[in-house]
Image (cartoon, helix red, strand yellow):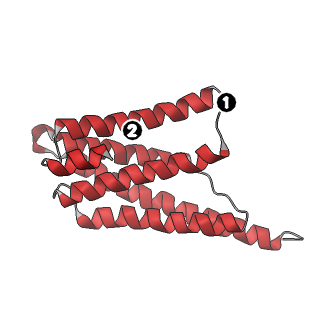
Amino acid sequence: MVFILVCLSGDGSSFAATVIFLLASLTDFLDGQLARRTGSVSETGKILDPLADRILIGAAVIALTIKGLLPVAGVALVVSRDIVLLFGYKLLERRGVVVRVSRLGKSYTAILLAAIVAVMAGFAPGGYDIGLWLFWVGVTGSLLSGALYVMEGVSRLRAERIRPGG
């Protein structure tokens, strides 16, 4: 990822790193919008798009932590949540259970993306670090949506076991 190289080569808040991250985020968003509007949403896309979001966010928050711009604890929570959900998704998939991305999950992904941009851009009007505040809102929401995904997955597994022939 060019973004990671640019981010790590400077102070983590360079204009170039911010622009590259913004472009990656925007093209991902526009790709999803275009797929929905043209009716070309695929099952593969439904799996790969959220995975790409998690990789982009994970790589960005780790790079910004290395640069000392984000707290290790928050990044550990975000990355751990994503790892748990990835393994959970694979486990559920083997049993024929699919849990789709929720609006809540998408909302907190957007908040984390905005937080990353604000942190990289050094956006702190009046000395108030908007990026760090958004980051913690995103971490909290990410954990909440992750818990809801786990609960939905467990519920669907139980329903599969109860169903005749299941």
Which residue corresponds to the image point at 27% horizontal and 41% vertical from the top-left? Answer: 117
Q: Which amino acid does label 1 sit on?
A: Gly
Question: Nearest the camera: 147 or 109?
Answer: 109
Q: How crowded is mark 2: few (under 14 residues within 10 Å), some or many (20 or more)?
A: many
Which residue corresponds to the image point at 79% horizontal and 73% vertical from the top-left? Answer: 161
Q: Where is residue 62 in the image (x, y as percent from the top left)?
A: 28, 59
Image height check: is 142 above or below 18? below
Q: Where is residue 54 in the image (x, y as percent from the top left)?
A: 43, 53
111 horizontally vs 126: left or right: right
Q: Is mark 1 on a helix, strand or loop?
A: loop
Quarter where residue 154 is shown? bottom right
Q: Residue 39 carries which label?
A: 1
In three-dimensional space, the C-alpha distance between marks 2 and 1, rounded to whole angstroms, equals 21 Å
Q: What residue type is labelled 2?
A: Ser
Look at mark 2 in the image and give the residue it sits on: 25
Q: Position of residue 155 (x, y in %)?
A: 68, 67
Q: How crowded is mark 1: few (under 14 residues within 10 Å), some or many (20 or more)?
A: few
Marks 1 and 2: in contact by CB < 8 Å?
no
Which residue corresponds to the image point at 18% horizontal and 54% vertical from the top-left? Answer: 69
Q: Where is residue 115 in the image (x, y as percent from the top left)?
A: 29, 46
Question: Nearest the camera: 136 or 101?
Answer: 101
Quarter where residue 151 is shown? bottom right
